[in-house]
Amino acid sequence: MELAVLDRTGKATSKKVQLSDDVFGVEPNEHAVYLDVKQYLANQRQGTHSARERGEVRGSTRKIRKQKGSGGARFGDIKSPLLRGGGRVFGPRPKVYGFKLNKKLKQVARKSALSMMANDKAITVIEDLKFDAVKTKDYVQFLDNLKLSDKKTLLVLNEQDKNVYLSSRNLKGAKVVTVSELNTYGILNANNLLLSESSIATIEKSLS
């Protein structure tokens, strides 16, 4: 698949990039994509939810009433789950929701996601982007030039660029990552994938 390289004004340059069919042209494996996205979302969960059971609630251990003779059910102390302020029965406990996936499966999922974006013609290749200072309006203008200001975009840089990242951070639908931070969920969550020219070789090398 051959794409023209655009500059930051949105105009096509004389350069063209050939995307590898081994990465951007594979048959999508939807189950691998599902598992990778599921793992990503599971890892975002803190799992710190916790409730106090009757052994953890503060209160007297005095028996409230006699065991027999009251005509009611047997009763323990004030920390009983049946009373207001008592412990909770089988309450939530801290838990790790993440799970393991094989490296090869995650590679297949990433290739599938990139191929889906390529099939939808949702990939744009741009020249390596550099900002002299942190200015959100410069990034807004950059997206306007590409006619993508009203869409969710994911810009993939080959290396970290603090000015570009900070310029985009305040925009709701714009996200900037490096190749090492690229994941299946991030790719599919964007309407359009912006690849810097130098990042393509790194992506293809890491997934081949």
Image (spheres, rainbow, N blue to C red):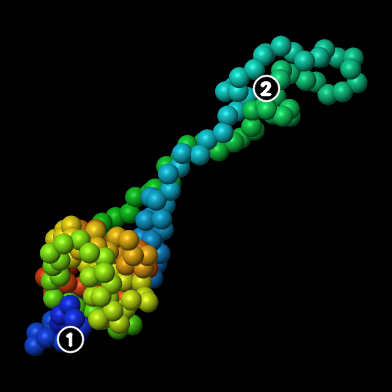
Left or right: 61 with respect to 17? right
Q: Please state which amino acid type lies under the numbered disc 2.
A: Lys
Badge 2: few (under 14), some or many (20 or more) residues near its Cα, within 10 Å? many
The quarter of the rendered structure image containing the C terminus is bottom left
Residue at 12% across, 64% down: 132
Dot in front, 1 or 2 = 1
Q: Residue 190 bears which disc, if any?
A: none
Residue at 64% across, 28% down: 87
Residue at 25% across, 75% down: 141
For label 2, the residue is: 79
Q: Residue 11 bears which disc, if any?
A: 1
Secondary structure category for the residue under label 2: loop
Q: Please state which amino acid type lies under the numbered disc 1.
A: Lys
**Does 141 appear above or below 97?**
below
**Does 169 appear above or below 151?**
above
**Does 160 appear above or below 62?**
below
Secondary structure category for the residue under label 1: loop
Percent position of residue 169, x then y: 29, 60
Which image quadrant for residue 135?
A: bottom left
Query: Mark 1–mark 2 contact, CB under 8 Å?
Result: no
Which image quadrant for residue 124?
A: bottom left
Residue 168 visible in the shown view: yes
